[in-house]
Image (cartoon, grey):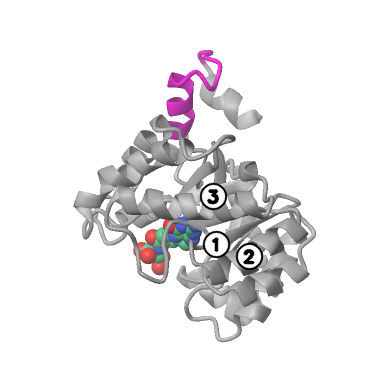
Amino acid sequence: MFIIGELINGMYNNIGKAIKEKDKDIIQKCALAQINAGADALDINCGPASRQPHLDIQWLVETIQEVTDKPLVLDSSKPEVIEAGLKVIKNKVIINSTTADSEKLEKLVPLAKQYQGKLIALTTSTKGIPQNKEQRLELAAQIVAYCAEVGFNLLDLYLDPVVLPVNVAQAQQKDILESIHEFKIISEPSPKTILGLSNVSQGTKVRSLINRTFLVMAVALGLDAAILDPLDKELMDAVITAELILNKQIYCDSYLEAYRKK
Ligand code: THG
């Protein structure tokens, strides 16, 4: 499982404040803590309060690149903000995200190619978030068709079914999970799959348990990558164990420690 740390997001009060005050130390410590906990890459999102997201994302990228060469995930719904971030990228990059809308695909797929990056695509469109797995699959197929047409490597494409909070969209959860499996059979080679895990538990009282349970089910359906809180140790242990059960890790009595040392 490719783990993307979610914590450098202006939505969190401490990070929002650090971005505003240009406090490098807070950001760099947050980056290193996530990597030490097992993150393979770091999501970077200026948050909704940023007044100048173009400059903030550049400052975040430069600040984080001072302490790590792990891949960075540029997270914005505005292609211009992602483009600004790309201008200062030295590490490997993942663009987060396009949707199925042609305007976004036409802008972001060429940028992903130009920067030899990977691309996350949400199976949403200007018509909104799909209400069932058939609609998700239809949007996924449109995204895959566009990428295939312009020669974007499907192995660098991560499809995201868009996880919704279980307290407001309980009837959607099964379809979201099953989409992970269905996305895999759209094309050969298969696109990869990803999700933003913490969305599922927003506004609930037992966040960690809901996150953990959802993630184990998603891993069983073939999930390749997740944006999550790597400091949640029980969550990380559950992923490693789910992969062990699926024969993706070799068993030994100390398999948790063995995995962590990798
Ligand atoms: N898919 C993709 N990218 C994404 C998402 C996705 N990026 C953003 C988001 N979803 C994933 N990251 C987060 C980060 C934080 C939270 C949820 C998802 C979160 N934050 C607390 C909250 O809202 O309750 C903040 C609490 C606080 O202020 O401390 O839950 O789905 N491709």
Report the residue marked by disc 3.
Answer: 144
For numbered disc 2, what is the local secondary structure? Answer: helix
Mark closer to the observer (2, 3): 3
Residue at 32% over, 49% down: 134
Marked residue nearer the N-terminal end (3 or 1): 1
| Residue 109 x/y as whole percent | 64, 60
Which residue lies at the image location 61% right of the left edge and 81% below the top edge? Answer: 21
- Extent of the magenta region: 237-253
Quadrant for the C terminus, please: top right
* Label pair 2/1, CB-CB below 8 angstroms: yes
Q: Mark 1 points at which residue?
A: 97
Mark 2 vs 3, N-terminal side: 2
Q: Is residue 155 above or below residue 58?
A: above
| Residue 195 coordinates in the image, percent (x, y) | 45, 49
Quadrant (top left, top right, bottom left, bottom right) of the N terminus = top right
Q: How many labels does the image show?
A: 3
Identified by mark 1, the residue type is Ser
Please name the residue that numbered disc 2 is placed on. Answer: 108
Q: Is residue 244 magenta?
A: yes
- Spatial distance from mark 2 to mark 1, Cα to Cα? 8 Å
Q: Quadrant of residue 165?
A: bottom left
How packed mark 2 is, by other alpha carbons closer than 10 Å (few <14, some 14-19, many 20 or more), is many
- Front residue of 196/236: it is 196
Q: In this view, does 99 lie to the left or right of 258?
A: left
Q: Identify the secondary structure beneath mark 1.
A: strand
Task: Compare residues 192 and 125 and report the one nearer the observer.
Answer: 125
